Image: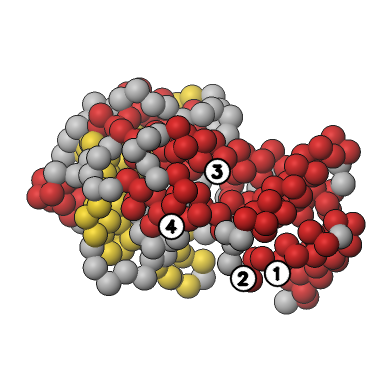
Amino acid sequence: MISVIVPIYNVEKYLIKCIESIINQTYKDLEIILVDDGSTDSSGKICDEFATKDNRIKVIHKNNGGVSSARNQGLDKANGDYIAFVDSDDYIEKDMYEKMINIINKYGVDIVSCNYNHINGKIESFFSLDKDEYIDNKTDLVEKIFQYKNYDIILFNKLYKRYVWSNIRFPVGINLAEDLMMLYPTINLANKFYCMKEVLYNKIKRKEGLTNSKKIEDYINNVVAYEDFLIKVKQNEILDYKRIYISCAEGLFRHYRHLLDYLYIYNNLEYKDLKKELEYKLIDMYNQGILSKKNQKKIFLLKLNKSLYKKYRILSNKWKEYRGKGK
């Protein structure tokens, strides 16, 4: 049996399609756990109505605590041999879990992932893959993740053997980067992985989603998650830290720079020391020569003159904002 955990908060516009895509799966041995995280719209009512029609559905109503809290409650109630997560504003292809179960049975893997669509006006698959891939080397896996060649850090396009989640839970209070925070614990416990080229999950991009949050704390969470991941990798003798660090470098660079831009623009004195720390880290990455030529050029001005770089980044971001409003 697969336990499918769906954290839900104020998604009445999308929820029916999401739930129907799960209950109509060709693989029928499902436990569908709908966790209503204190919704103030009709989402909770929609969950209850579906539960009266399908005895595979369990509904949990709780006070709002965030997506991590909701997923944890779902994990605590799960009884399946396998664990899956679906975001409540997305939907899945009807044979997603049947195909994933078949892969697990055939290859004996601990985690299987599929390709997925990004839907934002138009539909685009996230990976450009020409074949499936079986991976039993964790360093190879992590390298592919951060080079965006396969697998990815996200949770929703995967099916896990239950034991992977037996003793780990999501960090509560984190609205961004929770997927990355769970990457190391899950791949550390698992040993065999399978990446499917086929698109079986549909990710809806919506303006009000958490991924558009503009809180400094959320940007900091992304940086902390990256750095925490690398610390754990460094402590693991099985993994090749140097290879993984280089593969992570471009992603880490983007998060450092994104956060630094935000600190420049909002100029909050509370983060004065963090600003200096980020400048140092970016210059250190430049000095190590681990970035692409394009990103090396982006940091050259920072290395040359921090004050001038700050002015340039503020003007650059204001220009982007102006052009965006003009379209």
**Disc 4/disc 2 C-alpha distance (Å):** 32 Å
Residues packed near mark 1 inside 10 Å, few (<14), some (14 to 19) or many (20 plus): few
Q: Amino acid type of disc 1?
A: Lys
CA gap between label 3 and label 2 equals 22 Å
Mark found first going from the N terminus, 1 or 4:
4
In three-dimensional space, the C-alpha distance between marks 1 and 3, rounded to whole angstroms, equals 23 Å
What SS does tag 4 mark?
A: strand
Q: Nearer the viewer, mark 3 or mark 2?
A: 2
The spot of residue 101 in percent (x, y) is: 16, 47
Residue 326, quarter of the rendered image = bottom right
Label 4, on which residue? 203
Q: Residues within 10 Å of mark 4 (few under 14, many from 20)?
A: many
Question: Judging from the image, what secondary structure is the residue with disc 2 in?
Answer: helix
Circle 3: residue type = Tyr
- In three-dimensional space, the C-alpha distance between marks 2 and 1, rounded to whole angstroms, equals 6 Å
Q: Nearer the viewer, residue 29 or 246?
A: 246
Could you tell me how far apart the alpha carbons at marks 1 and 4 are, in whole angstroms?
34 Å
In the image, is residue 24 above or below residue 126?
A: above
The residue positioned 45% from the left and 60% from the top of the image is 147
Point 79% across, 44% down: residue:
275
* Quadrant in which the N terminus is drawn: top left
Label 3 packing within 10 angstroms: few (<14), some (14-19), many (20+): some
Q: Check whether the beta carbons of the residues at disc 1 and disc 3 lie within 8 A of each other.
A: no
Q: Which residue is mark 3?
A: 226
Determine whether the residue tagged by mark 3 lies in a helix, strand or loop.
helix
Residue extending farthest to the left is 106
The residue at the point 31 percent across, 63 percent down is: 199
Task: Look at the picture and state if 55 lies above or below 251.
Answer: above
Tag 2: residue type?
A: Lys
User: Which residue in the structure is indicated by mark 2?
Assistant: 293
Evaluate if marks 2 and 1 touch, with contact meaning CB atoms under 8 Å apart: yes
Residue, disc 1 = 297
